Image: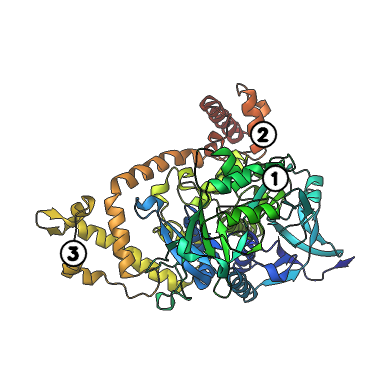
Amino acid sequence: MYIYPEEFDIIVIGAGHAGCEAANISSKMGCKTLLLTMSLDTIAQMSCNPAIGGVAKGQIVREVDILGGLIAKVTDKTAVHFKMLNTSKGPAVWSPRAQTDRTLYRIVMKQFLEQQKNLLIKQEEVTKILTDDKAVIGVLTKHQNVYKAKCVIVSTGTFLNGVIHIGLKSFQAGRYSELHSSLSDCLKELGFEIKRLKTGTPPRVDGKTVDYSKLEVQPSDNTPIPFSHFTALSEFPYNKLLNCYITYTNQETHKIILDNLDRSPLYTGIIKSVGPRYCPSIEDKVVRFKDKLRHQIFLEPEGLYTTELYLNGISSSLPEDVQEKFVHSISGLENAKITRYGYAIEYDFSLPTQLYATLETKLVEGLFFAGQINGTTGYEEAAGQGIVAGINAVLKIRGDEYFILGRDEAYIGVLIDDLVTKGVMDPYRMFTSRAEYRLILRTDNTDLRLIKYAHRYGLVEESFYKLFLEYEKKLNELKKFFETKTLGNETIANLIRQSKEINFEDIEELKDFKLDSEYYWNTQNLLNETKIQIKYSGYIEKQILHAQQLKKFENKKIPKDLDYEKIPGLLKEAKIKLSQIKPQTIGQASRISGVTPADISILLVYLKKLRKELSNS
């Protein structure tokens, strides 16, 4: 056994989208960090579709970005197609999405990480978490090497006891042609409750063999908007923009699939775990939605230097010959050559109710979980957890107050609160509908919501922070100006609320609000943000007021060692759930399934009595 001579503050296990953000942010905050990955060549590998963002996911990407993360910066540098979704609806659901060059994405991410001070990246497989008196002290690798650390962040993706299924064949793997991880055996020994989930990926085809004349063209936005607040507009976009395409399954496709369900691992009982509810396989779609005559397929380019296309919408674990048949039944794909077959993968995950809202585990002090190990699906959800786990690991080492985002502050806050309070029944995916305050969690105001935290933790450069402060100052001044400046018989603010056409170029005074910035904090975004805040001011104020009213419960802390069995009057189910979840606040306790308003009232009375007794003793 070799004990590595250098001791680290933080060790991150796994270099997927959660691990990259955790390692980057912890080292950026000054902690000596070690990132251990099974392969240096697959850092930030996009296991499924070559895309970042989407409904609610795009908001998470921008939140990670303003907090000092990498996912938005890397997306901007590697994207080949941009689309702002839901623009026909209100700004609460506008969501940016981009297709990226899959290979370029991982190369650029690795470059960012390699240039980060305080960060060492090594190729090692971790097999054991080392603890002492229920506190983490380091890790042991497959080659019997010991690395010591004060905190450990586990972000292992689908690699935990991963098993791939193609038809009736199955084999252990973390991704196709990559080894799985046996680390969950150690986690079980430490007392963690481990369960199984399933996800999948579709076949890819050679674009040279596709008949594009039969497909619907989906061009990129003409004037794409960067994901990152820190991308210089003069340099953007970095790459040539490519088209996506749309086609559809048909009745012949569906018949081929239905005729071969006896060879499907999903319908022969081989796969026993639950898959993503909102992203089902084509087998699931055809069986569950028999009334639908067709299902949409997006053909997404894999990159600038390849002809491979990703067939988004037909994830499948059917045998190879069946995949060939049903792909060739689709318009435009009659002669398409499959380059990679689709497959399903089952993997272990840890029930996220075993975590605090900091993403530190309740069983082992200094051990954090982030990403798919917590039952989520998606690069963006993983990145959001990674940056929170990384920040909190640093704050734990410093002895500072933890970083917990509220549900009214960020989609990341909604995501983590849902995980640690409610748990998961199937792979968790973020949607705008999950956020009760989505009108104040817009993609356009991410900086206004979260840059204060980035500044507090030293995660934003002073030059950018000064740009923001000037932008924020002019934003408040411009709102006041629009409320008083009249055009005809109405103020500009009232015209905006009435959705009236206004020629802003004719308003001479707007020259006083010019912002000479090539970053996000520019004149155009200032005007757009002002218009949104004025137009939806009534609704925004209602959501803010509602959030403030509930804050009193979020601010009421619950002692970590509170014995719920001793509280008279609590329902038995409430005692079980509260003891299991160990909520950190009354607000969190009120969101636990099975805990009633009456239970919360009893808990409040008990805590008040407890505090009075402590103050008198």
Q: Nearer the viewer, residue 362 or 384?
A: 384
Q: Are marks 1 and 3 in contact (CB under 8 Å)?
A: no
Q: Residue furthest bottom?
A: 234
Amino acid type assigned to the residue bearing label 2 in the image: Ser
Amino acid type assigned to the residue bearing label 3 in the image: Asn
Which marked residue is nearer to the observer: mark 2 or mark 3?
3
Lower position in the chain sequence, tag 2 or tag 3: 3
Please tell me in which quadrant of the rendered image residue 118 appears.
Answer: bottom right
Residue lying at 58% horizontally and 70% vertically, measured from the top left: 105
User: Which residue was labeled with disc 1?
Assistant: 264
Residue 520 is situated, as x and y percent measured from the top left of the image, at 39, 68
User: Which residue was labeled with disc 2?
Assistant: 579
- Dot 3 falls on a residue whose secondary structure is loop
How crowded pointer 3 is (Cα within 10 Å; few <14, some 14-19, many 20+) is rated as: few
Q: Disc 1 to disc 3, how far (Cα)?
A: 60 Å
- Dot 1 falls on a residue whose secondary structure is loop
Lower position in the chain sequence, tag 1 or tag 3: 1
Residue 521 is situated, as x and y percent measured from the top left of the image, at 37, 68
User: Which residue was labeled with disc 3?
Assistant: 503
- Dot 2 falls on a residue whose secondary structure is helix
Quadrant for the C terminus in the image:
top right
Q: Disc 1 to disc 2, how far (Cα)?
A: 41 Å
